[in-house]
Each structure stands twice: as C-alpha cells, then as structure tokens.
Image (cartoon, rainbow, N blue to C red):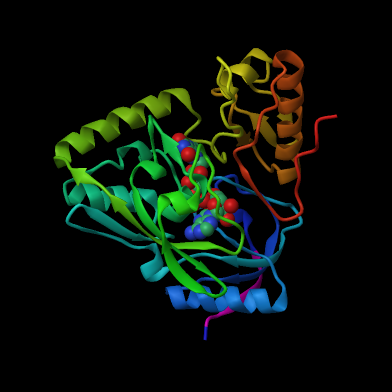
C-alpha cells in the first residue's frame, strides 16, 4: 500500500521556494506504484503532477488541489551499461552525469548546470550549450492510469523546451544513448561550462531558471528585458535578477503572485518596446495564470 499524505508543502520542493501545499502527496518507488496512483487519481477525478527538483516550477500560493508525485528509490537512480545510461525519471541530472562520467560516457555534459531530474528534463526537453534531451534520448518509459510503455523521442514530440506529454503522464524511466569519452575530458568540459554559467547567471540565488523562452528575434529574452531597463526591478519579494534579466530571484519572502506580476510586467514591456510576445518557459502548477496581454 503506497502512503498518501495530505496538505504537504510544495514551497520546500521548488528551487524558487514559494507556493502552497499539495492536497495529496505520494512518493512512488516503482513503476507499478506510479500506475496505481495515477489510476486512483483518475478514478476519483483528481489532477496529477510530478515534482522533480522543482527547478522550473512556480506553484500557486493557494497550492494544488490534486495529487503530487515525487519519484523515489529505483525511480531516482541511474546506471550505465555499455553506451547506454538507464535512469529513473526522478534521477537528478547531476547523478546521471556522475554515473556517465564514471563509466567513461560522454554526451550529457551540456546538462551539467541544469538543476533538474531527467524526467523533468524530458518534459521540458531541457537543453543548454547546443545540446538537449532530444539529442541523447533513446526512449522513455511513460506511465499513465492504464499502464506504462516505452516511447521514442518522436512519439514524445520533443521540440525547443517543449514535449507533447500531458498532465497525467509520468516519465518513469529513460534510456540515454551516450558515447565513449575519457573521464578527464568530461571533467574539463563540465568545469568550463560551469564557469561560463557562473559568470553569466545568478547561480547562487533562488530562481526557477529562465523565465521566458528565447523568441525568434535577433535578441535573446534576457537582452530584450535588459534593454527594457528591467534588471533589478522588484515587485514584493521577487526581483528581476541584477545579473541576468531573464531570471527572477526570490529576494526574500517572495510569493508566487509577486513572480507572476513581474512576468506580466516584463511581457508587457517587451511587447511595447519590441513588438514581441514572450512565451514563459517556467511551468505553472495550481490556480495560477499569467494575465493575457491587453
Ligand atoms: C539555476 C537554474 C538554471 C537552469 N538552467 C537551465 C538550462 O540551462 N536549460 C534548461 O533547459 N533548463 C534550465 N533550468 C530549468 C530546469 O532546471 C529544467 O527545466 C529541468 O529540466 C526541470 O527539471 P525538474 O526535475 O526540476 O522539473 P520540475 O521543475 O520539478 O518540473 C517541471 C515540469 O516537468 C514536469 N515533470 C517533472 N518531472 C516529471 C516526470 N518524471 N514525468 C512527467 N513530468 C514531469 C512537472 O510536472 C513540471 O510540469 C534551470 C533552472 C535553474 C533553477
């Protein structure tokens, strides 16, 4: 019997550190547990969401009136076999990278500064420095209320920071196709990418990563918001990062509503100044919405 808790705080489970509780919360330790929980939620008509490391997530201050799953045990582990890395959907990318490096497998270095799980990374098709999940994913085990089955990247509909997965579908496991690379070479690449990241982004602050996807425009979202004079702009406890304008920092006691107000203001200014409607990259959970541009 899987333990289901009630009214569990989600703020502690996100990197931004805001938001209310989940009405129900469970930590499945096997694919069968995930399917059982999804079938139960489906039967009683409750929405379901997975929280990975909460690094791309803004939870409503009122919380989420559904079931939150956090994958544990074998669903959060990784191991290498030949040139394949097999991992549970809840395995942190840092753990995957560590296992790959220890087995002399390269290809995952691009993810060294992405503080999420591999399941969250599939959901988002996370990427950096020219690489993304779509480029290394052989297949993913996706569970729903009826069971679990393997999907190819094409079936998952991966494109720029997006997948075709829907709420109620859980990435329970992945197989990543990597290639032989010397451990020292991997170490060097990772050190260089991490230094680059530290110089450009607020890596030591509470954020949810990039606020907006980069638009089809000569300027990135960050440069656009910078040109709008938004660096350091603050609403309540949330602040546009003084270091990189496409990040919002929890500058102390922020609420999710403060971040939403900043997102709305940034979108308004980008449209006014550049005629571009920026699309949020951050994922929203619960009764929380970015207001429409008037
Ligand atoms: C400092 C910082 C830097 C970042 N840099 C990058 C970057 O360079 N590139 C990039 O792409 N992203 C970046 N991000 C964003 C984030 O780390 C990625 O999107 C990451 O893949 C999210 O993984 P997660 O496990 O934290 O997912 P969460 O934030 O917990 O969830 C994100 C979404 O995925 C869903 N989800 C999570 N796990 C699963 C699962 N197993 N099955 C189904 N759905 C699931 C959630 O329900 C939610 O909708 C950064 C974030 C931070 C804070």
Q: Which sits in the foreground, 286 or 194?
A: 286
Q: Give the total of numbered labels.
A: 0
Residue sitting at the far front: 154
Q: Quadrant of residue 181?
A: top left
Percent of width and height locating residue 108? 31, 42
Residue 119 pos. (x, y %): 45, 55
- Which residue is more in the foreground, 110 or 248? 110
Position above or below: 115 against 228: below
Residue 3 painted magenta = yes
Where is residue 239? Give x, y as percent.
66, 30
Q: Is residue 29 visible?
A: no
Residue 162 lies, with reference to residue 130, above or below; the image says below
Specify whether residue 266 is painted magenta.
no
* Residue 197 appears left or right of 294: left
Instruction: Examine the image and state in which quarter residue 16 appears.
Output: top right
**Furthest-right residue in this view:** 294
In the orientation shown, which residue stands out farthest toward the bottom? 1
24 lies above or below 154? below
Task: Give percent across and percent down for residue 178.
Answer: 25, 47
User: Quadrant of the rendered structure where residue 247 is?
Assistant: top right
Residue at 55%, 47% in the rendered image: 15
Give the overall secondary structure of the magenta segment: strand
Quarter of the figure that contains the C terminus: top right
Which residues fall within the magenta stretch?
A: 2-8
Q: In the shown orientation, is residue 143 left or right of residue 178?
A: right
**Residue at position x 69%, y 21% in the image:** 276
Residue at (59% x, 25% y) in the render: 215
Q: Is residue 33 visible?
A: yes
Residue at (22, 37) in percent of width and height: 187
Position above or below: 111 against 98: above
């Amino acid at each position: 019997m899987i333990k289901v808790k009630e009214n569990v705080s989600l703020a502690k489970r996100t990197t931004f550190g805001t938001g209310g509780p989940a009405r129900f919360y469970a930590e499945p330790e096997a694919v069968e547990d995930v399917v059982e929980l999804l079938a139960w939620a489906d039967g009683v008509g409750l929405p379901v969401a997975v929280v990975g490391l909460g690094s791309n997530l803004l939870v409503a201050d009122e919380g989420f009136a559904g079931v939150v799953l956090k994958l544990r045990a074998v669903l959060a582990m990784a191991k290498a076999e030949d040139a394949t890395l097999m991992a549970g959907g809840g395995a942190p990318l840092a753990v995957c990278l560590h296992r790959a490096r220890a087995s002399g497998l390269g290809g995952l270095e691009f993810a060294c500064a992405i503080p999420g799980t591999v399941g969250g990374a599939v959901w988002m098709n996370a990427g950096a420095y020219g690489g993304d999940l779509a480029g290394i994913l052989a297949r993913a085990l996706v569970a729903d209320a009826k069971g679990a089955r393997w999907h190819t990247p094409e079936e998952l509909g991966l494109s720029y920071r997006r997948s075709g997965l829907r709420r109620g579908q859980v990435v329970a496991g992945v197989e990543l196709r990597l290639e032989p690379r010397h451990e020292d070479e991997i170490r060097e690449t990772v050190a260089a990418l991490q230094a680059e990241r530290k110089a450009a982004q607020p890596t030591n602050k509470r954020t949810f990563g990039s606020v907006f996807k980069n638009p089809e425009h000569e300027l990135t979202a960050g440069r656009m918001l910078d040109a709008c004079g938004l660096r350091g702009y603050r609403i309540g406890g949330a602040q546009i990062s003084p270091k990189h304008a496409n990040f919002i920092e929890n500058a102390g006691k922020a609420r999710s509503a403060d971040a939403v107000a900043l997102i709305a203001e940034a979108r308004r200014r980008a449209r006014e100044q550049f005629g571009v409607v920026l699309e949020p990259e951050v994922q929203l959970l619960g009764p929380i919405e970015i207001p429409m541009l008037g």
